Image (spheres, helix red, strand yellow):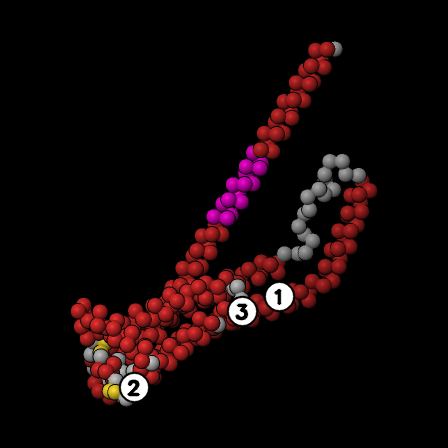
Amino acid sequence: MSVFTHLVAELGRLLEPVLAESATAAAIVLFTVLVRLALHPLSRAAFRGATPAAGCLPMLLQLPVFFVMYRAFSSAELGGKANELLGHRLFAAPLGTRWTGALEEGGLFGAPGLVFLGLFAAIAVVAAWSAVRGRRAAAAAVQAGAAGAGRTPGATARPGGAGRPGASRGQAGKRGKAGNAGKAGVGSGAPALAEVSAEQRELMRKMGGFLPLLSFGTLVTAAVVPLAAGLYLLTTTAWSVAERAWLQHRKDRAAEVADGERDGGLRDVGLRGGERRGGERRGGELNDGGLRSRV
């Protein structure tokens, strides 16, 4: 606790010439950013899905920080001395006050109440952004699942099929019989697979509509904790959404680059194959011309 209060107090003193009474509030935001920067490697591992525990660690490691923040701005004394942090403000609202206290002091549209309304509005914007991104991700997952379910096993043509030059009729007949048997086997089990995939898609659709709404639960928490803890919630939530959007952007860019390199490699292979076939045709024409000249 003393380390946290000392760090916030020092950051506040550094920012005080610029931000005056709101310097401690800015110090809380800066402290939250430093915490999230320290947790960024774990967030990247969670986004990549490296380990199941990686997705929970960033959230779990923030709980002690949030608890310390809550205690620091809720206790009248720290270390046997008066808590000087309670005297700091964000504009007209003390950092240790709650929304109920702001309502009692000046009403909903009093000076402290307006500070809380601004905080709630910012949290609502971040929650809406998170909800929209969550719904889009869920819709993309449902579409991917539907596309995967629409593919029929065994429908992909293998290179070197019956149309390959040099293939015997017996081999083609054997492949045809095997293909028909495979189709019959798949057809007998297709309804069950389709039923399971449909249930999974419906579950994903429902979860995609419900889970993004949980981000608005931060509003409820911010309404019952001190203003300083609400600032911490706003900053860490905004960081989480922006960080995930940035990681997704990098992933999409890397996929586009990989697709472009793969397409370029395929074109190069095709060009080399065309040049080789052209050289073989020219060599064959020269040989034919030499034989005719000898005749």
Secondary structure state at the residue bearing disc 1: helix
Q: Is residue 280 left or right of residue 177?
A: left
Say which of 174 and 40 sits in front: 40
Q: Distance between the residues labelled 1 and 3?
A: 24 Å
Q: Name the residue under label 1.
A: 197
Amino acid identity at mark 2: Gly
- What amino acid type is highlighted by mark number 3? Pro
In the rendered image, residue 3, in percent from the top left (x then y), is placed at 32, 77
The residue to which callout 3 is attached is 52
**Quarter of the image with the C terminus in it:** top right
Q: Which residue is drawn at 78% across and 51% down?
A: 178
- Whether residue 97 can be seen here: no
Is disc 1 surrounded by few (<14), some (14 to 19) or many (20+) residues within 10 Å?
Answer: some
Q: Give the distance between the C-alpha atoms of the residues marked 2 and 1, in whole angstroms.
A: 59 Å
Query: In the rendered image, which quarter is residue 77 located in?
Result: bottom left
State the residue at coordinates (64%, 68%).
Answer: 196
Question: Is 266 placed left or right of 223 in the picture?
Answer: right
Badges 2 and 1: C-beta atoms under 8 Å apart?
A: no
Residue in front for this viewpoint, 95 or 110: 95
Q: Name the residue under label 2.
A: 79
Q: Does the magenta stretch include residue 284?
A: no
Residue 6 shows in this picture: yes
Q: Which of 168 and 21 is in front in this view?
A: 21
Q: What stretch is highlighted in magenta?
A: 257-271
First in sequence: mark 1 or mark 3?
Answer: 3
Which numbered marker is on residue 86? Answer: none
Q: Quadrant of residue 28?
A: bottom left
Which is more N-terminal, label 3 or label 2?
A: 3
Q: Residues within 10 Å of mark 2 (few under 14, many from 20)?
A: few
Above or below, 107 relative to 131: below
